[in-house]
Amino acid sequence: MNSVPSPSPTGTAQAAPAIPRVLTIAGTDPTGGAGVQADLKSIAANGGYGMAVVTALLAQNTQGVRSIHVPPMSFLREQLDAVSDDVRIDALKLGMLGTVDIIATVADWLAQHRPPVLVLDPVMVATSGDRLLDAAAEDALRALLHQADLITPNMPELAVLADAPEASDWPQVLQQAQQVASRYQVHVLAKGGHLQGALAPDALVTPDGSVQEFPGERIVTRNTHGTGCSYSAALATLRPQTANWAEAVARAKAWLTESIRHADALQVGQGHGPISHFATLWRLQQARG
């Protein structure tokens, strides 16, 4: 079942455990809908043991970000070392990195402790369309893409990585994903969530340009806060449990669809609320009575 080997403390490869140990490196969301809080829920919902290293502390809620506090880089490195000195990491999800210094610190740690699976969610563009990184940080993040196995940009972020205007239709999304996959020699999850219409397809694009599509329906809800965070964390968790990336994407997309479908029932916040990470589990519990 677990096809991705995990390095042992002695450097030899071992099979990943039935419950993969998954580390997320990202910012926080005190309302629990995004960032490491959402990642930990996603990891647990998809059968993993979650761990988290915090890059930035955000004062935010379902209505937006109020302020950001970035701890010293020495403390970020201490967090990273505290995990890797003690725990064998089977998969890693990278989320909000934010600055050149954070990216450099994470990259230096990765050079020594790169886990078997690395999913990078390139947090570069806000829902409003505002760029979240300055030019130097964007360049640093681009350099980090080469170390990832899979990246999960939304459509605005995919356009930035492709150095192109945002795609207006699905064929353009796929074309940009192929360009990025080839340029950075990385698998790209192309996502159609920002498209108009009743469909919300995704596609797995490989460095050689092949495309495998995953059809999806659009669920009408405003409660999609943290969808990108949750999707990428689920993928990092499922890859050690599956035979290939295509199977991991299929399972993650099915889980995410159900989580969005039941998001309104949570009634969290007055803005764009979170998805329901444990919707499937809760329904099974209710069915058992």
Image: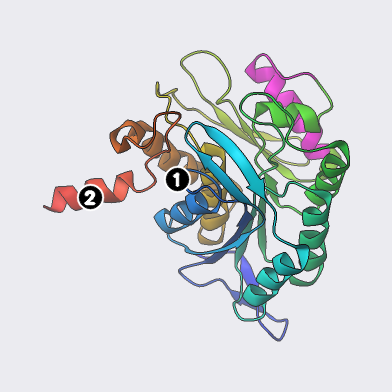
Q: Which residue in the rendered view is the most extreme toward the bottom?
A: 10
Assess whether residue 31 is covered by the magenta stretch. Answer: no
Q: Splitting the image into 4 quarters, where does residue 152 fall?
A: top right
Residue found at x 71% / y 18%: 167
User: Percent x, y for residue 39?
Assistant: 52, 52
Q: Splitting the image into 4 quarters, where does residue 168 fall?
A: top right
Mark 1 neighbour density, 10 Å: few (under 14) some (14–19) many (20 or more): some
User: Percent x, y for residue 127?
Assistant: 61, 27
Q: Is residue 127 visible?
A: yes
Q: Main secondary structure of the magenta part?
A: helix
Q: Is residue 287 above or below residue 266?
A: below
Residue found at x 32% / y 44%: 279
Q: Which mark is residue 80?
A: none
Q: Which mark is residue 31?
A: 1
Mark 2 neighbour density, 10 Å: few (under 14) some (14–19) many (20 or more): few
Part of the protein shown in magenta:
165-182
Dot 2 lies on which element? Answer: helix
Dot 1 lies on which element? Answer: loop
Q: Is residue 114 visible?
A: no
Q: Amino acid at mark 1?
A: Thr
- Nearer to us in this view, 8 or 273: 273
User: Percent x, y for residue 26?
Assistant: 63, 53
Q: Amino acid at mark 2?
A: Leu
Q: Which marked residue is nearer to the observer: mark 1 or mark 2? A: 1
- Residue holding disc 2: 284
